[in-house]
Image: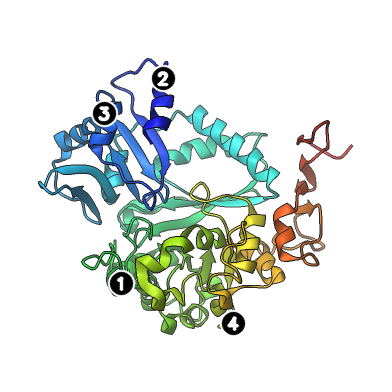
């Protein structure tokens, strides 16, 4: 950490009024406190997101700017961790991290526009024609600026992030076009496994006083879902731990989603650890299991240590959900994990790291076929975005959105999925990406077929 941060600082003229923001610190490998950051940068406020974006690490300057305005009390649904002397350590959990992050000025619209353009091109190079993304309200104008230009080609399904589960504050004017949809509210019901803030019925195996953080309970959440559904809004809920997933399912049931799944399209994001008795409830309630196979590969080295062997049985349980009749929708959770769908398909099929570990796969009874994984990434995700009539499959009358790969992964050994290349990406009949073999290999984008 010190080496990377020092490299960043080298040769820069620092402005004490300008925040330094970073991302990607993996708590399962390294822990830092404000003192560690203070040694490198004591004068500018520093904010570093954890790898899972559910915790953050700040220096003393950042803490002072926050506590000067808001004090040192833990915000609802969040925690400022303290050291053995009860001083703020600079480690922020859940809503405490989001509260401090609000002090950082929102980038200018042109910066958001530029980032979206780069992200779009990167997605096209991975064979992606449509993407869903959760966006804070203060970033929505930047997205609108991008969507209104000729540069915008990818289909975007945008979710407005709820910060308080207050529907009157969260409601907005819905927008829907062929390439842009804004009709979904995204809420967080718990934290993350890596940060030990995911909500569980029983304590963590390696932290016996901790059951994680449930950010909302069933009753208030059900009222929120019901109000959103009345307005025709879709609700997507982040849930990692078994307790959080049960809260979501209970809330959807209390809100009247049973038998109306096709109308409301309720969805739970991640569904990482489930109670066995909750598996069948997804199909019963019409709740979409929106999962990211790449999370399994990233988390499996430490999951058993975190939650014990028994709870691992229904961790990332996409096969059990499929067999119980649930609708699966797969994605990546980028930038938390790698955006490449081929890596995700390999993970869903093998439950192995690309290196081949562990032999036979982790909890291999949950492996899917390649065809099932492809369906979850394509038609499953189109259904989850209410785009199944126009996209998700190649058929007469649908959008001409498709990807050409270098080999037929339906007929190749699973390990060859990792060697497969995206040759071409087409959106609405337009070639938005084409891989060409120039001298030494390389990639080149073309706007149409010549």
Distance from the alpha carbon under mark 1 to that under mark 2: 50 Å
- Give me the disc on residue 39: 3
Instruction: Tell which tag, 1 or 2, sits nearer the viewer.
Output: 2
Instruction: Tell which tag, 3 or 4, sits nearer the viewer.
Output: 3
CB under 8 Å between discs 1 and 2: no
Relative side of 375 to 15, left or right: right
Q: Position of residue 199 (x, y in %)?
A: 32, 66
Quarter of the image for residue 262 reads bottom right
- Judging by the rendered image, the residue that carries numbered circle 2 is 10
Q: Position of residue 8 (x, y in %)?
A: 43, 26
- Judging by the rendered image, the residue that carries numbered circle 1 is 218
Distance from the alpha carbon under mark 3 to that under mark 4: 53 Å
Q: Residues within 10 Å of mark 2 (few under 14, many from 20)?
A: few
- Give me the disc on residue 323: 4
Distance from the alpha carbon under mark 1 to that under mark 3: 44 Å
Point 74% across, 63% down: residue: 393
Q: Nearer the viewer, residue 446 or 142?
A: 446
CB under 8 Å between discs 3 and 4: no
First of labels 1, 3 by sequence position:
3
């Amino acid at each position: 950490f010190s080496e990377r941060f020092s490299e960043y600082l080298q040769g820069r003229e620092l402005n004490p009024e300008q925040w330094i923001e970073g991302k990607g610190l993996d708590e399962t490998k390294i822990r830092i406190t404000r003192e560690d950051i203070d040694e490198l940068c004591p004068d500018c406020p520093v904010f570093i997101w954890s790898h899972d974006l559910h915790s953050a690490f700040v220096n003393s300057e950042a803490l002072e700017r926050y506590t000067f305005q808001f004090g040192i009390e833990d915000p609802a649904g969040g925690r400022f961790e303290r050291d053995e002397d009860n001083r703020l350590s600079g480690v922020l959990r859940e809503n405490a991290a989001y509260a401090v992050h609000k002090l950082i000025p929102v980038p200018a619209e042109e910066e958001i526009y530029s980032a979206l353009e780069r992200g779009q091109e990167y997605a096209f190079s991975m064979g992606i024609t449509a993407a869903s993304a959760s966006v804070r309200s203060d970033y929505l104008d930047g997205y609108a600026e991008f969507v209104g230009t000729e540069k915008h080609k990818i289909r975007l399904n945008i979710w407005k992030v709820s910060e308080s589960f207050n529907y009157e504050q969260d409601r907005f004017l819905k927008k829907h076009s062929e390439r842009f949809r804004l009709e979904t509210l995204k809420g967080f019901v718990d934290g993350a496994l890596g940060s030990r803030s995911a909500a569980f019925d029983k304590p963590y195996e390696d932290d016996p006083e901790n059951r994680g953080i449930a950010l909302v309970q069933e009753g208030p959440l059900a009222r929120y879902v019901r109000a959103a559904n009345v307005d025709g809004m879709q609700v997507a809920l982040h849930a990692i731990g078994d307790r959080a997933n049960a809260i979501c399912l209970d809330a959807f049931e209390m809100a009247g989603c049973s038998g109306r799944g096709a109308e409301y399209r309720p969805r739970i994001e991640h569904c990482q650890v489930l109670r066995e008795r909750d598996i069948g409830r997804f199909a019963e309630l019409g709740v979409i299991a929106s999962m990211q196979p790449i999370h399994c590969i990233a988390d499996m080295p430490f999951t058993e240590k975190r939650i014990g062997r028994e709870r691992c049985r229904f961790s990332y349980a996409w096969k059990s959900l499929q067999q119980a009749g649930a609708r699966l929708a797969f994605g990546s959770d980028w930038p938390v994990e790698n955006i490449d769908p081929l890596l995700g398909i390999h993970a869903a099929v093998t439950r192995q790291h690309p290196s081949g570990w562990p032999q036979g796969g982790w909890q291999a009874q949950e492996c899917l076929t390649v065809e099932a994984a492809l369906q979850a990434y394509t038609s499953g995700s189109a259904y989850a975005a209410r785009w199944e009539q126009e996209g998700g499959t190649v058929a007469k009358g649908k959008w001409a959105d498709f990807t050409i790969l270098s080999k037929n992964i339906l007929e190749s050994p699973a390990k060859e999925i990792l060697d497969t290349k995206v040759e071409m990406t087409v959106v609405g009949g337009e070639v938005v990406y084409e891989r060409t073999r120039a001298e030494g290999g390389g990639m080149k984008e073309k706007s149409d077929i010549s």
